[in-house]
Image (spheres, coloured by chain):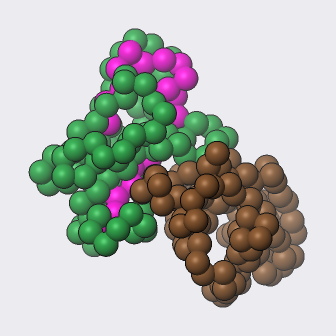
Amino acid sequence: AQKVTQAQTEISVVEKEDVTLDCVYETRDTTYYLFWYKQPPSGELVFLIRRNSFDEQNEISGRYSWNFQKSTSSFNFTITASQVVDSAVYFCALSPYSSASKIIFGSGTRLSIRP
Amino acid sequence: DAGVTQSPTHLIKTRGQQVTLRCSPKSGHDTVSWYQQALGQGPQFIFQYYEEEERQRGNFPDRFSGHQFPNYSSELNVNALLLGDSALYLCASSPWGAGAYNEQFFGPGTRLTVL
């Protein structure tokens, strides 16, 4: 099976707290890409990051960081010092080599940041 | 540089009708993918077009069909609409050339409501 599981349906935190969004994936392919997208209320999907299956280095971009662990098939996303503008639905996604450009999305995590 | 554009923004149809949604890819992109996002769910891949041909298809019935024009723009057609077709339809574009893992840029979507 090729699938992405985001077990956290909704998360609500107070502004300035750190928050981690979990993502677990399944794929038979040894070559694949993982993504995170942000979907604000406007509906447009905003690309955040792409990682390939051969690069397990963690990545940090400002307040955002990503932890990729092949051993546990996880690709978690942490927002440090959250802000109200971070409120959105976040999707983790997988693109296996065998499916070319098809992107398989998780069901999303709705993140609410309270002032 | 215009991003991915979609029209119309919103659409209301009744069961049994047919609908056509339109997408113009980002400048320089020649590949268009369509996704269906039901309320509270992640986007699901419908199909992808490149060089005016359907290259890959997800698990959608034949009622869903598409077309790509020489200028790379694309249409999604849905026949015999069902209530369950109500969703946000997202178009994504990417360059094909370097391989299957080019970043896909998403449009704002068309919200289809079937009554």
Q: Is residue B60 above or below residue B83?
A: below
- Residue at x-position 45% and y-position 30%: B60
Name the spot of residue A8 as percent of width and height, x first.
Answer: 81, 54
A16 vs B64, nearest the viewer: B64
Q: Is residue A108 visible?
A: no
Q: Is residue B114 left or right of residue A93?
A: left
Q: Colour of chain B?
A: green
Farthest top residue in view: B16
Q: Is residue A41 above or below residue A50?
A: above
Q: Is residue A78 above or below residue A43?
A: below
**In which quadrant of the rendered view does residue B53 lie?**
top left
Chain painted brown: A
Query: Does B76 appear in magenta?
Result: yes
- Residue at x-position 87% and y-position 69%: A14
Name the spot of residue B15 as percent of width and height, x first.
Answer: 45, 13
Segment tinted magenta in the rendering: B75-95
Query: Does B85 appear in magenta?
Result: yes
